[in-house]
Amino acid sequence: MTYCAGILVQDGLVMIADTRTNAGLDDISTFRKLHIFSWPGDRSFGLATAGNLSITQSVISFLHEGLPHPETGEIETLRNATTMFRAAQLVGRCIRHVREIDGPALDEAGVKFEMSMLFGGQIKGQPMRLFMIYGAGNFIECGIDAPFLQIGEHKYGKPILDRAVTFKTHLYDALKVGLISMDSTMRSNLGVGLPIDLLVMRRDAEDLELNRRIEAGEPYFHDLRERWSAALRAAHMAIPRPPYGPSSP
């Protein structure tokens, strides 16, 4: 299981992903799911992955190597994509290419072609954008009214993002809320766990502002978890009990 979130606010982009993968209760490993493609001064992208690890790793490899353009035959990569939309299309083409190669064998083995990705970033002089790309290679885009996207085990962290994030949220408040969302997911699902990879990209900057891994015992994240738990306990104690007991009118 996986949890990844992308938050696109007025000041920039935050992407967060856990690293836990498992093929059973006794086979738990750590793999990076947040991948960086960056050419400082020109373009930077983040790509978060969920689903079958062998599929997503193959997609990442094809993104590094590139694919021939169906009309010109020239090798198309994220480095030479002309727009964010074209870059997202390339990610979708790589997914379909992997499905074409590995799909029949996976079907024969009874393994579903399950994966999804979050793809965000900016090309110099163009708008910053964030997409969710599905296993068929199609995608949707994040918008101002709903400034975040999630993949994987998203149901535990979504209510926090729904209540606390708007397009005008400060960039590092968006990071803070994203980490709270990740903590809530980790509390409710053992298939999501540390370390956590994250990136922060400021709009119209020429490089990533932050590319960091949070390991177990990291002081700020430990403090955030404790403060959030205490704040929830205090909030529920401050709300009056329901007037529905036996003595109620």
Image (cartoon, rainbow, N blue to C red):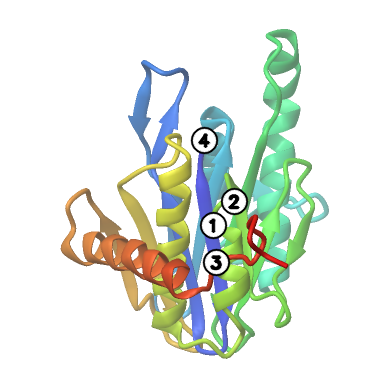
Q: Which residue is mark 3?
A: 241
Query: To which quarter of the image does residue 199 belong?
Result: bottom left
- For marks 1 and 4, the one nearer the N-term is 4
Label 1 amino acid? Gly
Q: Secondary structure at mark 1?
A: loop
**C-alpha span from label 4 to label 3:** 37 Å
Q: Earlier in the sequence, mark 4 or mark 3?
A: 4
Q: Which mark is residue 1?
A: 4
The amino acid marked with disc number 3 is Arg
Give the percent coordinates (x, y) of residue 238: 44, 75
10 Å crowding of disc 2: few (<14), some (14-19), many (20+): some
Q: Secondary structure at mark 4?
A: loop
Task: Tell me which amino acid carries mark 4.
Answer: Met
Q: CA distance from mark 2 to mark 3?
A: 30 Å
Towards the viewer: 141 or 104 = 141
Which residue has dot 1 on it? Answer: 157
> Are discs 1 and 3 less than 8 Å apart at CB?
no
- The residue carrying pointer 3 sits among few (fewer than 14), some (14 to 19) or many (20 or more) residues within 10 Å by Cα, namely few
User: Relative to 207, is 137 above or below?
Assistant: above
- For label 2, the residue is 154
In the image, residue 60 sits, relative to residue 228, either above or below, namely above
